Amino acid sequence: MFFPAYNPERTWDFKMHKKGRVIRCITKDATIVALAMDSTAIVSEAERIHKTSAVVTAGLGRLLTAASMMGIMLKGKDDSLTIKINGGGPAGTMMAVSDSTGNVRGYPVNSVVEIPLRADGKLDVGSAVGKKGLIYVMRDTGGAEPYIGCTPIVSGEIAEDITNYYANSEQLPTVCALGVLINPDLTVRVAGGLLIQLLPFCPENVIDRLERNTASLPSMTSMLDSGMSVTDILGKALDGFEYEIMDEYQPEYKCSCSRNRIERALSSMQPEEIRKLPDEHGMTEVTCHFCNHAYHFKGDDLEVLIKNQSND
Ligand SMILES: [Zn+2]
């Protein structure tokens, strides 16, 4: 069975909930930090922008959800986080970039991948992403060089790859669950994630209890689809623990592009390369990968950029 191709005719109702919701909490004995996210609005927006097929919506949606929660874990207000995954599958490289309040943007190199569902009827994200390659996590904390960690892809299903990344690159035992449920018309029904980390010196009995809880936890999509809030989901994941909510965020799919930024990117090119850009009508169009916004430059605009280059 294949999902139908993208249908540009269908209508949208996601205006009602433009924002995601993330709750972060910590257990009273300070052994566990947990985040739960409803990313439905964010993944809907990604699907609207990139016109992704179902399996790419699911893969990119999981990546955006993970990046948003990991962004919230950043220490500095102006820090940012990038996750890049390329497993050699038909979706190509997928990228997500987030800030410290969980706002996130991303793109897949190939928006439309049509592959059969898995034997269990689920979208085959692992095959779309591929299993031969690396997952990179880059944290830009304002220093001269960003911190970059990477680990081999385990399954291409994203959540497992994030768990493995934390275990092997950062030595942080982590539970990660990510899910995107897609309607027959390819809109996003629900999307969300859970990220639980054990803090150093976490006692065995706490680990055992958490393992029992997570083993019996329904999937993210079934919990969200049954109407459970992120607070309810955290309550279920941390059943038996005393915890308090640290903070709450309402992140959005948010692009940071601007004409100014595009001009700076163009200015980094050689003058002869810049002059090759215009089409037969003398126009240059530069499209942002993250939001598909098109910026237009006339020949004169490019000459101004080149002139300013030599003034620098
Ligand atoms: Zn943009």
Image (cartoon, helix red, strand yellow):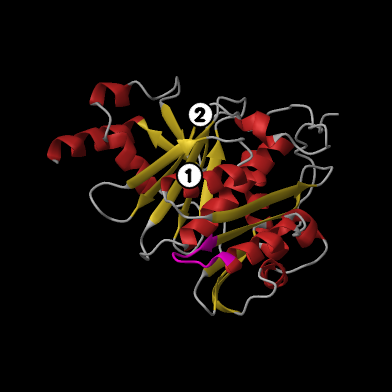
Give the camera-side residue of 146 and 218.
218
Q: Which residues are magenta?
A: 197-204
289 to the left or right of 80: right
Residue with the mark numbered 2: 133
- N-term mark: 1 or 2: 1
Residue with the mark numbered 1: 83
- Could you say which quadrant of the image residue 190 lies in? bottom right
Q: Image point 52% across, 63% down: which residue?
A: 198
Q: Image point 76% across, 61% down: which residue?
A: 224
- The secondary structure type at the circle numbered 2 is loop
Q: Is residue 244 magenta?
A: no
Give the camera-side residue of 164 and 99.
164
Q: Residue furthest left?
A: 311
Q: Looking at the picture, how far across and down is residue 149, in whole percent? A: 39, 43
- The secondary structure type at the circle numbered 1 is strand
Q: Is residue 203 magenta?
A: yes
The amino acid type of the residue labelled 2 equals: Gly
160 to the left or right of 262: right
Q: Between marks 1 and 2, how big is the CA–CA gap? A: 13 Å
Q: Image point 53% across, 61% down: which residue?
A: 197
Res 112 seen here: no
For residue 12, above or below residue 267: below
Q: Main secondary structure of the magenta part?
A: loop
